[in-house]
Amino acid sequence: MAEGSARGDRFMLYRIVGNDLYPRHDAGQSLANLRFTLDHEPPLHGCEKRWLLNRIRHPRKLEQLIELLERHGCGYDVIPFEQKVFAAVPWDWDVLPQPSFLGSRAYRQLLSHQRQSWEIALYRHKNNYLMHNNGARNRALELGRTRADWVLPWDGNCFLTEAGWQELREAVLRQRGADYFYVPMQRIADNAHLLDPAFQADPRDEPQLLFAATAAEQFNPAFPYGRRPKVELFWRLGLPGHWDAWPDEPWDQPRRSRLQPVPACPRAGWVARLHSGVRDASRGAAAAVLSQKSRYEARNLAIKASVNQALLAEGPLVQAAFAAHWEAPLQQAARRHELQRQADVGIELLQAWQRWWQQGEPAPAVRQEALVSGLLHGCWQALLDPDQIQDQALLENLGSQWFAPGDRGLQPRLRLLQRPLASGRLPGTKPSLAAVEQLALLSDLLAWRSGAWSWQVCFQAFRDALAEQLNALIQPAWFGQREQDLKRLQLVLALLQRHRGLPVEPVDALLRLLTQAQLSDRIEDPQRALVLALAKQHGLLTPEQAALVVHRPVPPLLPLSVGGQ
């Protein structure tokens, strides 16, 4: 009590501003909410306000935040984002029960939210660097303890009204012997509501914490954003709440033991949380604040998207994974000659198929995937040297037939039966896994360079529908009977989702494959080499790991011969 009575009345409010995490937050919400706070929050008696700019990735965004703070005469500190340091941060492979867990039958038998939780757990180290949630809170505590008697290491969207601050300050100074206080929070559906003199607070959301400068505890830096980083300290302090019923999940970090004796942690005032800019469309127009389930899903997607985009230090990823391979015949005569030979064979196969389909000639003894490969080689040759292709009109006609919408064209669903189709079947059927692989490579070719074919718009719709179906298909446990098929399908999915320009789904597929592709000095298995090369393109390897991957990715093209065998 003697120490408490000696504590002064100087408060330090540190608000931490990080990167916008879309779709959990609206793009630009941190700058917009900072502007709202600087324009409308009243002076807080006895409190110094400072801002902690936390690993802002985009230089221009950091400049805008600093310009705004300096224009209002506000103090700030910066925790820099360093690309090379971030790239060297590893994935948390140790969290998995076994190295190949994400490729196992046991993983695929889990519920959707459980699979998602294991995947997001892999991001923990990257998350802790980029989002730097508890790390920034501890830095704010460290800085604030040198400047005040009481420190508020709060999120950047926190806003205090004059009445709320007065209630908070009086509660703290009335109970100076306490080392910790909790401050209930209310999520605001519209920031303008805080400017209404008749606004009535009803704070029921997860509270913020206030610390005496001499308090010993801090936040657990092992707990990442999205996995109870603040709640872990609630547990340690013995602060009661609905979080007491939350179990420890196998993908979580171990919580620290509860302090004994349990320290006092009284309530002090309340705080508003400004709107994130994202509304819950699933709950209707009135649902301005996201539900807990929607926040959970949006937060996980935001973590993945933010990390994956930050890994691409040199700019957006080129959609075509095999661009160097498609370009090679332009520089190498041997490659050019081989492509011409394969394209000629492909055109022969396609001409024989069309004669059968349209004129009733005998069915060609050709597999479905060989026909797709024939179209792929023909299109490749036409893109590089249209004068050397035998039959441009054939490519136009077959593409229009095969990728026509509805039941007239190739169906964008994987054929699950193992027995082969009758020779030559294509329109109206579902492709085999081998044919799907070649379709993914055709998609990559067209992502590299568009041609003048009218069917490309229909093909993109086909590709998108196929990717959606495959994404749902990879989870069922029946696929565990053919693990090699599952790996092939994951590669296909990684390519198709990349062609769609999605930031998360290709990486999800590659991370599942990486759990089964351990790095070594020699990379001999062609599929493994391909996984590692694609992972390198996405920035998923540390610099040391990436140095081991010296080869460019080579697409698993199906070689063609007369007869399609």
Image (cartoon, rainbow, N blue to C red):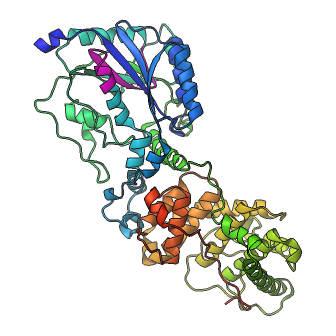
The x, y position of residue 213, in whole percent, is 25, 20
Q: Residue at x 35, y 26 (%)?
A: 140
Residue 87 lies within the magenta run: no
| Vertical relation: 233 (above or below) 433 | above
| Vertical relation: 252 (above or below) 152 | below
Of residues 440 and 14, the one nearer the viewer is: 14
Of residues 95 and 356, the one nearer the viewer is: 95
Q: Which residues are magenta?
A: 142-160
Residue 374 is drawn in which quadrant? Answer: bottom right
Of residues 541 and 137, the one nearer the viewer is: 541
Which quadrant, please, contains the N terminus?
Answer: top left
Residue 149 lies within the magenta run: yes
- Is 229 on the left or on the right of 395, as rendered? left
Residue situated furthest bottom in the rendering = 362
- Is 251 on the left or on the right of 434, as rendered? left
Which quadrant, please, contains the C terminus?
Answer: bottom right
| Vertical relation: 80 (above or below) 375 | above
Q: Residue at x 41, y 23 (%)?
A: 15
Count of residue discs: 0
The x, y position of residue 498, in whole percent, is 61, 58
- Is 15 on the left or on the right of 1, as rendered? right
Visible in this render: residue 412? yes
Residue 279 is drawn in which quadrant? Answer: top right
Visible in this render: residue 190? no
The x, y position of residue 108, in whole percent, is 41, 65
The x, y position of residue 381, in whole percent, is 79, 74
